[in-house]
Image (spheres, helix red, strand yellow):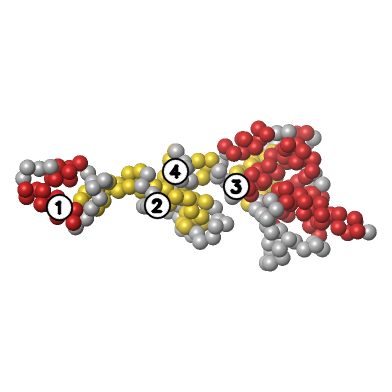
């Protein structure tokens, strides 16, 4: 009947809206981005625990606050400097946010330069102007006309979309703040069954929701022994990412724990 034919689709789309927002585009069949109405993904067992996990999340506001503090990324609003692997500017606004020097935003001193700007010139240049010797005053005016006054170089940081470099150089110091990638290392041994399993899956679901809404990457590394460690890759808002999430949520924990795995 109609319910059997469309029930799974409607339930799945509703859950996708809650996880990835209403503009996720996962019903767009261009390339391998989304799903069709007849796609078998709607019958996946991973949809079943989602309502219970979302109910669990509603009672854990502290988890949302914790996720907002985890992860570091380069950002213009950062107050601390940290080392990051260098990335290059991207033309796509969908790529990960990074920072670069913005010479139009004079918020800090980044070095010395030559200019004709009286507001940024060094004090020793002002000495020429105040000198009692006419030749030195003429020298100052000549340097200003030629824009050769020794001055502070002012610049700031600006947020820009970035992508990986093929051959990255050594790490660079950039301003950092929260909002970086989320990497979850999760014990999936038998000791995590029951309520612990529900909480663990709730953390993963909350991390995916937070990462998607804030433009961050989210990866899950699950382990139970040295021979059973699985890295999910990035769980993003596309067909592959949804299947990774559903596969994880449908997985039943079991096995012994080996933290060296």
Tell me what residue is drawn at x 68 percent, y 55 percent: 23
Point out residue 192 in the picture as x, y percentages from the top left corner.
75, 35
Numbered disc in front, either 2 or 4: 2
Q: Considering only vertical position in the picture, is 191 above or below 91?
A: above
Quadrant where the C terminus is found in the figure: top right
Mark 4: few/some/many CA within 10 Å (<14, 14-19, 20+): many
Tell me what residue is drawn at x 69 percent, y 59 percent: 25
Q: Secondary structure at mark 4?
A: strand
Numbered disc in front, either 1 or 3: 1
**Disc 2 from disc 4: Cα separation:** 13 Å
Q: Which residue is mark 2?
A: 102
Q: Nearer the viewer, residue 210 or 197?
A: 210
**Disc 1 from disc 3: Cα separation:** 52 Å
**Disc 4 from disc 1: Cα separation:** 38 Å
Q: Which residue is mark 3?
A: 214
Q: Nearer the viewer, residue 126 or 46?
A: 126
């Amino acid at each position: 009947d109609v319910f059997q034919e469309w029930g799974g689709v409607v339930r799945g789309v509703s859950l996708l809206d809650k996880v990835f927002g209403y503009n996720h585009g996962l019903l767009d069949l261009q390339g391998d981005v989304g799903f069709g109405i007849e796609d078998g993904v709607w019958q996946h067992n991973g949809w079943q625990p989602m309502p219970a996990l979302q109910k669990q999340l509603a009672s854990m506001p502290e988890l949302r606050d914790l996720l907002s503090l985890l992860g570091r990324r380069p950002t213009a609003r950062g107050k601390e400097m940290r080392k990051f692997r260098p990335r290059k500017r991207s033309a796509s606004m969908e790529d990960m946010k990074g920072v670069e020097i913005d010479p139009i935003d004079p918020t800090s001193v980044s070095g010395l330069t030559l200019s004709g700007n009286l507001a940024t010139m060094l004090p020793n240049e002002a000495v020429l102007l105040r000198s009692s010797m006419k030749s030195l005053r003429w020298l100052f005016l000549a340097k200003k006309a030629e824009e050769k006054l020794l001055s502070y170089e002012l610049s700031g940081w600006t947020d820009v979309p970035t992508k990986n470099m093929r051959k990255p150089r050594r790490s660079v110091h950039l301003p950092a703040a929260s909002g970086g990638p989320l990497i979850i290392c999760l014990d999936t041994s038998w000791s995590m069954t029951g309520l612990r399993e529900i909480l663990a899956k709730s953390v993963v679901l909350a991390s995916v929701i937070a990462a998607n809404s804030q433009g961050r990457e989210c990866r899950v590394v699950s382990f139970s022994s040295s021979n059973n460690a699985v890295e999910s890759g990035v769980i993003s808002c596309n067909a592959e990412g949804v299947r990774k999430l559903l596969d994880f949520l449908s997985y039943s924990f079991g096995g012994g724990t080996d933290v060296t795995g």
